[in-house]
Image: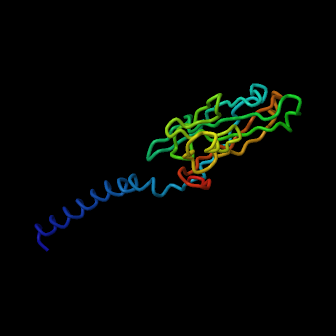
Amino acid sequence: MNRRSLLKWTSRIIGWTCALVVAIPGVSFITAPLRRRSSSGAITQRVAKLKNLRVGEPTQVAITGSRQDAWVHYDEEVVGRAWIVRETDDAVAPEATRVKAFSSVCPHLGCAVQFNAERGFNCPCHKAFFELTGQPVPDAQLGYKNPTPRQLDDLECQIVEDVESGEWWVEVKYQKFEYGLTTKVPRA
């Protein structure tokens, strides 16, 4: 082997080594979101003190948590909203109080559901209306076909006591659901 061939092979080895040093972390960076395991997306959080909720008056609460998009991690950010409706008054013991929680996302096309004191919950995008129980308002009562394929997505909620303060809280398990379907299907 002459000196020219030796330099040629040495240059190739150095070139491929440099290419791999750059390529391996680059490929790892690009494929990281594909390797990440998906979670159920459910967040359990205390959202409101029981004493602050009025019977039959919906209260919208923000659900905060950490969120990750492709490569950026956000620690404390609003990841969703829920409507809380207290069904029983203070005459009932706190642990026996009934509270319902609904996602604030319309099951029709995913718009934000608002509260209308005259008609209950409504979706301003396509005029879908829901009762305080989450059920769609009947077409005969609206005067047109209610476009929603199902009732509001209810969320698991429970009444818990804070051991330190002795106060009662509403705890909600927030989860996102697919919209446009006739059945409630959790998002992955």
Is 115 in front, or is 138?
A: 138
Q: Position of residue 40 (x, y in %)?
A: 60, 52
Of 12 and 44, the residue lying toward us: 44
Quadrant placement of the C terminus: bottom right
Camera-side residue of 17 and 123: 123
Residue placed at 74% from the left, 31% from the top? Answer: 56
Q: Residue furthest top?
A: 52
Q: In the rendered view, would you say 173 is above or below 76?
A: below
Q: Quadrant of residue 38?
A: bottom right
**Image point (73%, 40%), residue name:** 100
State which quadrant residue 155 falls in.
Answer: top right
Along the line of sight, the residue nearer the viewer: 86 or 175: 86
Instruction: Give the percent coordinates (x, y) of residue 169.
Output: 76, 33
Residue at the spot x=72%, y=34% of the render? Answer: 85
Residue 34 horizontal/vertical position (percent): 45, 57
72 to the left or right of 7? right
Q: Horizontally, is 133 left or right of 127 in the view?
A: right
The residue at the far bottom in this view is 1
Please, is residue 2 above or below residue 79 in the view?
Answer: below
